Amino acid sequence: MAPEPKALSAWSGAFGDRYTERSGASADAVRGRARVWAEVLSKMEGDMPGSAIEVGPNLGLNLMGIAALSDMELWGIEPNASARERLVADGVLPADHVIEGFGHAIPMADKAVDLAFTSGVLIHVDPSLLEATMREVHRVAAKYVFCSEYFSPKPEAIPYRGETDLLFKNDFGGLYLDMFSDLVLVDYGFFWKRTTVMDNCTWWLFRKV
């Protein structure tokens, strides 16, 4: 039996706890996410999602940014217990909308939400679980799939905070299009760190047809 990928225990355990402690949900950070999401949501004008799930929300900055702009029903699936506790304690999500788990096994029905997305999460998925994770994101989305991740034209492992096997760049947009014939690219772009709160991430928005 193959050993469990390092990323699973890292993000659900002490490594993930430290990440949560470093992260901050300041008013400026939330306003910055709202500006970013205003750009993304503008691409869905005329057919706005009524519900969304974020895979790996941590403290929920993206969810807070969306909530500042929309009344859509929001969910999160998060492996780290301290982050899940904060999501509820900080009023980001009600307890029954916070799911314990990883993106490769989302306990929701097919097309359960209009929008399913990741932001800086696919880069931390072990390559052995990447396809399963992307298939789950696609499966639970009724209308839209969105991701914002570090880009590389080819798979590339990057050392991360002194650790190996925890950060992987890729052409995630290309992978989605190659995997799913029912996805159409709505738009893509780049969140430059100098002008946004995002960390030089490439984003893609797809519509299911």
Image (tube, helix red, strand yellow):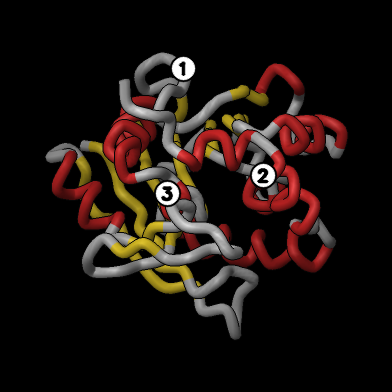
Question: Can you say which quadrant of the picture contains the C terminus?
Answer: top left
Identify the mark nearer the N-term, 2 or 1.
2
Q: CA distance from mark 3 to mark 2?
A: 15 Å
At x 21%, y 56%, the residue is 174
Q: Which residue is mark 3?
A: 122
Tell me the amino acid under the disc marked 3.
Leu
Q: Which element type, helix, strand or loop, lies under badge 1?
A: loop
Question: In this view of the protein, which residue sits in the foreground, 14 or 47?
Answer: 14
Tell me the amino acid under the disc marked 1.
Met
Tell me the amino acid under the disc marked 2.
Gly
At x 55%, y 25%, the residue is 101
At x 31%, y 31%, the residue is 132
Instruction: Work out whether 185 lies above or below 15.
Output: below
Instruction: Work out whether 55 lies above or below 169.
Output: above
* Image spot of residue 197 (x, y percent): 64, 71
Q: Is residue 34 left or right of residue 156?
A: right
| Whether residue 41 can be seen here | no
